[in-house]
Amino acid sequence: MPARKPSRPISPLFARYLTSDEKKSLRAVPADNPASEINLLRVLSAHFMKFQQSAPKDMDSRMQALRTCLVLSEQLSKLVRAYNQDHEPLDEIQVAIYKALDELSEELGIDL
């Protein structure tokens, strides 16, 4: 019987907000792989977008939400750029990016 790799711990800061599928997805990628950070950012973005559905609709709240979306987008692009400088683009990264874009466009109600 092959030895089972110990699962990586997920920070308690995030773990309490994640579903078991999200935790499994995050543990599936090695911690030293930028895909791990891209996947985490994808999960956090999805949670943020879900939260925005019930968030206050005043102008200050909307401006803060827009700033948060911009920061998330900027971080995602930096991670992808860093990954591509060191590696050939892999299918798994492309899948993660397209999945994130699909989820965000669905949450925002726009077609890409």
Image: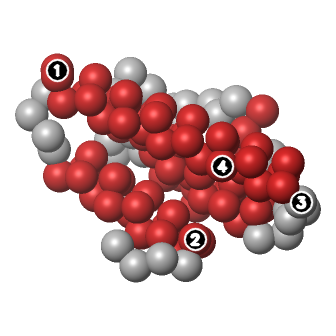
Label 4 and label 3: CA atoms lie apart by 12 Å
Element type at mark 2? helix
Quadrant that contains the N terminus:
top left
Q: What's the residue type where badge 1 is placed? A: Asp
Q: Return the residue at label 1.
A: 86
* Colouring used for the render: secondary structure
**First in sequence: mark 3 or mark 2?**
3
Q: What's the residue type where badge 4 is placed? A: Leu
Name the residue at 66% across, 41% down.
67
Q: What's the residue type where badge 3 is placed? A: Asp
**First in sequence: mark 4 or mark 2?**
4
Kindly identify which numbered label has been placed on residue 58.
3
Q: Return the residue at label 2.
A: 108
Quadrant of the rendered structure where residue 28 is?
Answer: top left
Q: Return the residue at label 4.
A: 66
Q: Is residue 43 above or below residue 57?
A: above
Q: Which callout, 4 or 2, points to the residue nearer the camera?
A: 4
Element type at mark 4? helix
Label 1, residues with CA under 10 Å away: few <14, some 14-19, many ≥20: few
